[in-house]
Image (spheres, grey):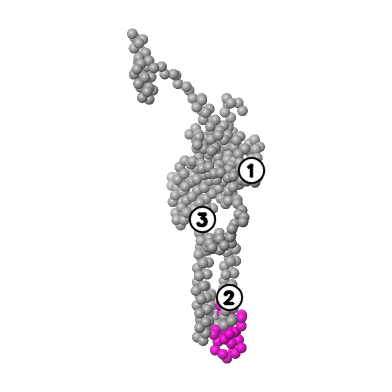
Amino acid sequence: MNSGTVQYSGVKCSDEIPNVLTDDNYYSKKKRYVKKDGSCKMVVHHVPEEWLLWVTDIFTTLVEIRWRVMFLTFAFSYILSWLFFGILFWIIALTHGDMKDPNNEPCVYEVRSFTAAFLFSLETQTTIGYGFRGMSENCMIAIIIVTIQDVISVFIDTFVIGIAVAKMASARKRAQTVGFSNCAVISLRDDHLCLSWRVGDFRRNHMVEGTAHAQLVRHLAHSTGKVNVTYKDLNIEENNIILATPTTTVHKITPGSPLYKVSLKDLRKENFELVVSFTYTDDCTGILHQTRTSYTPSEILWGQHFQEMIRVTRRNYRVDYALFNHTVKVLVPELSAEEYDLKKYSQRPKHKPLHISSPTAAVELVNGNSLEAEKASTSSAVQEHEL
């Protein structure tokens, strides 16, 4: 590339972004640290006392497991509790002699077999009460067992309802209705190279407040098998957002940015991952949520700008989410932000040297008033010419 000429380039954006094909047939595929849906691509092995940790925090464990596993867990908990207390009632009937003598006053009416004992346990815990089987006043131990079963059944029902409500009100479900654009773009804003991505809320109810955050994650694998992971924060302009309409989050590539020395060619060789998040409070539930995604270098499009998707009518603002991931080409130099700033400053017109011809001009220059110093020098020169 000729150093005296600034070349401009752009690449195409696709709605399916696991890999991006650029205009010059560059093709890249990077391993992800964070998936597009925000989950971490990580498998944990050899956790000390892992099962004990899961059981200790059983509520969180049940909230995080899948629905089908949760249904099976609670179904087995009900069945095992019915079976356990059914065995207890069967043992009580055996020891009291209800099985052998039908004329004996039983502890539990119509319980003369294991099947009847199991059905009585089920009817007691679910409060069905068909009217055939019931308690008598002859056995205090059976009355105590029924009381314990009723208390345990209340705890099981409360636990099941709490877990189900917690899963339905999970922050992950709400986070799925707040999304990021499939790709990030690099374009010029106010004559500065900027990295930007779009975030939007797909529901009618919106956030009370939200904060955007971005980190540049780099992982370096050594030949010894050691992996170093580093994190660098990106400064975001106006990171506090009320997400009433889709918003473009902007990071200005300044000298303090880790992308300041990255050009288009450098970007295609990088192996970092841009992890972005949006933490917010829902105005309906008041629950704190976080939505995450990531962008690999192949998903950061150089020379693109997000297409406008908001239209103002007489009555309201209309948002067309069909344009949420659409970008348009714009002219952007292929240089890094550092090279672009140097070239931009080098092309500015140079000022004429200021000749100090009077003490007044020197004083003004020392005080920082260059304009006044120039006026004083000019006045002094005119007076000398007249003389």
Gap between marks 2 and 3 measured at Cα: 37 Å
Q: Is there any visible trace of residue 126 in the rendered image?
A: yes
Q: Is there any visible trace of residue 328 in the rendered image?
A: no
The answer to if 59 sits in the magenta stretch is no
**Magenta residues, start to end:** 93-122
- Farthest residue toward the bottom? 103
Describe the element under mark 1 as helix, strand or loop. Answer: loop
Q: Amino acid at mark 1?
A: His
- Farthest residue toward the top? 387
Seen in the image, is 211 located left or right of residue 303? left
Are the residues flagged by discs 2 and 1 in contact, CB closer than 8 Å?
A: no
Seen in the image, is 1 located left or right of residue 169? right
Location of residue 177 in the rendering, given as x and y in whole percent from the top left corner: 52, 52
Mark 1 = which residue? 222
> Looking at the rendering, which quadrant does residue 230 occupy?
top right
- Who's the residue at 55% across and 45% down the image? 275
Label 2 environment density (alpha carbons within 10 Å; few <14, some 14–19, many ≥20): some
Q: Amino acid at mark 3?
A: Ala
Describe the element under mark 2 as helix, strand or loop. Answer: helix
Mark 2 = which residue? 84
Gap between marks 1 and 3 measured at Cα: 37 Å
Location of residue 361 in the rendering, given as x and y in whole percent from the top left corner: 36, 19
Of badges 2 and 3, the one in the foreground is: 2
- Who's the residue at 56% across and 50% down the image? 38
Q: Amino acid at mark 2?
A: Phe
Mark 3 = which residue? 171
Q: Which one is earlier in the sequence, the residue at label 2 or at label 3?
A: 2
- Who's the residue at 60% across and 50% down the image? 41
Location of residue 224 in the rendering, given as x and y in whole percent from the top left corner: 65, 45
